[in-house]
Image (cartoon, rainbow, N blue to C red):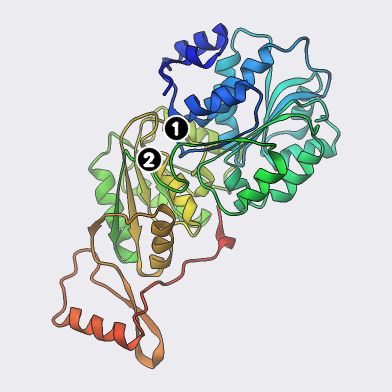
Amino acid sequence: MTDTFSELGLPAHLLRALEAQNITTPTPIQAQAIPHAMNGRDVMGLAQTGTGKTNAFGLPLVAQMLAMDGKPAPKTVRGLVLAPTRELARQIQEQLMHLIKGTPMKVGLVVGGASLSAQAARLAKGTDILVATPGRLLDLLDRRALILSEAKFLVLDEADQMLDMGFIHALRKISGLLPATRQTMLFSATMPKQMEEIAQSYLVKPARVQVNPPGQAVEKIAQEVHYIAKAEKFNLLKEMLDAHRDELALVFGRTKHGMEKLSRMLESAGFAVASIHGNKSQGQRQRALDAFKTGKVRVLVATDVAARGLDIPEVKHVYNYELPNVAENYVHRIGRTARAGREGRAIAFCSPDEMGELKDIQKTMKNDIPVASGTPWEKVAGPGGKSNSGSRGRGAAPKPGGARRAQQRKRSQGGGQGGGGGRGRGQAA
C-alpha cells in the first residue's frame, strides 16, 4: 500500500494543504481510489464511514481543477458533488475549503434551510466546485440560477442513502442536465441492490475500489447489545452516560418527537445535551453541532438525519437507544465513532418489538453483536392466540422450567424465532 501522498501524484499545493492539517498517510480507500481518479477514470468506492472518503474524491477533484485554465463562466459549475443531507454537504464543503486555500478556486454550498435568493446570487459569478443536496439543487435549476452543461466532474457521496431517501428521480433529472463526457465518482459505505442501477447509469467502465465488505462496521468499534424492556431504556442510558460524562456521546433514535423528548429528559437529569432532527431549522442544527464539537455539550441526541455527515473524531460512544428500521443505517450510526484510526464503543438497546430489526442488522453485517446483558426476546403465543414478547431482560432472574417451556413453545410454533416488527419507514428523521 502507498505510504505517502506524494506517491499518488498530487500537486505540491495539495501536499502542503494536507500537511497543514497533519494528514500524513493515505487511508486504504484514498490509496486505492486516488490514482484511478487522477488518471481520469470513473470510480466506484466502497468503504465504511470514517475512512476518509471525502479526501478520496476531493484530492483528485481539486488536483485536476488546478490544472484547468481560466475561470468558470457565469452561472456554471465545473464540478458537482451531491450529498443526501445538509450536515454531510457542509462537512464536504469545509474539507474542500482546506484543500483550495491559497488558490483562486471557489467552492459553493447549496442546501435547504437557507435563502434561495442568496444562494442564487452566489452562483451568478460561476463556481468551481458546487456541493449540494439534490432537492435544493433542483430548486435552483428550476429558477435557472445555474446551468450544469459545463460540468466536467460529478461526485455522488453516500449514494446508498440518496436511494433510501427517495432521491433517485432527482438524480436522474440532474444527470440528464450534465454533459455525457465527464468523470464520475460514486462513494458509499453500503451496497444495496439498487446501487447497481446507479452504477450502470452514471459510471463508464469504473475502477471498483472496495476496502471492506459492504455493510461491515469498522473493526475498532467495540459493539454490544442489551436486551432490555422499553420502559427501562432511559435508566440504563442515564447510568451509562453518567459513567463517562467527560466524553462525547451520540444517542440515536427513530422519531423527531421521541428524540426531542429524550433530550429534555436527559437535560432534566443534569446532562449537557443538544438535539438534532428534522424539525430543527438549519441554524438550530448547526448551533447544536457546533456546541457538540466544542464540548459545550457532551451528549447529542439525534435521528438518522445525523447518521451520516458527522465527522467529529472525539466521539467515543454511540448509543442506539432505538434500533433503526433500515439495517444499513446501523452501520452509518456507529460509524460516527472510531474515526481517523481511533477506537470507539457502540451500544445497542433492544426491546421486544425490535428483535426483527436486530436480526436484520446482524444479517447485513454478517456478524452477531456481543450480548452485554439480558437474553434474546422471543415471540410467544399469549391468551386468545395473541403474541406476547417474553424474555429475561436486564436484571431479571430465570424462571423455573423456563428453558424447557421455551423449547416446548418452539416446537409448537414450528421452530419459529421471535421478532416483533418495528415502526415503518414513514416515521423517519
Q: Looking at the image, which is closer to me, 262 or 302? A: 302
Looking at the image, do the residues carrying marks 1 and 2 touch, with CB atoms under 8 Å apart? yes
Q: Which mark is residue 51?
A: 1
x, y percent for residue 389: 34, 76
Q: Which residue is mark 2?
A: 218
Q: Residue at x 43, y 20 (%)?
A: 2
Residue 357 seen: yes
Q: How many C-alpha atoms fall within 10 Å of the one at disc 2: few (<14), some, or many (≥20)?
A: many
Quick check: 373 above or below 159? below
x, y percent for residue 235: 28, 56
> Number of numbered discs present?
2
**Amino acid on which disc 2 is placed:** Val
**Amino acid on which disc 1 is placed:** Thr
Q: Residue at x 73, y 13 (%)?
A: 68
Quarter of the image holding residue 236? Answer: bottom left
Of label 1 and label 2, which has the lower sequence position? Answer: 1
x, y percent for residue 76: 80, 24
Quarter of the image holding residue 366? Answer: bottom left
Residue furthest to the bottom in view is 384
Quick check: 282 above or below 52? below
Dot 2: what SS?
loop
Q: Residue at x 36, y 69 (%)?
A: 352
Residue 350 located left or right of residue 213 = left
Q: Residue at x 60, y 41 (%)?
A: 85
Quick check: 271 above or below 93? below
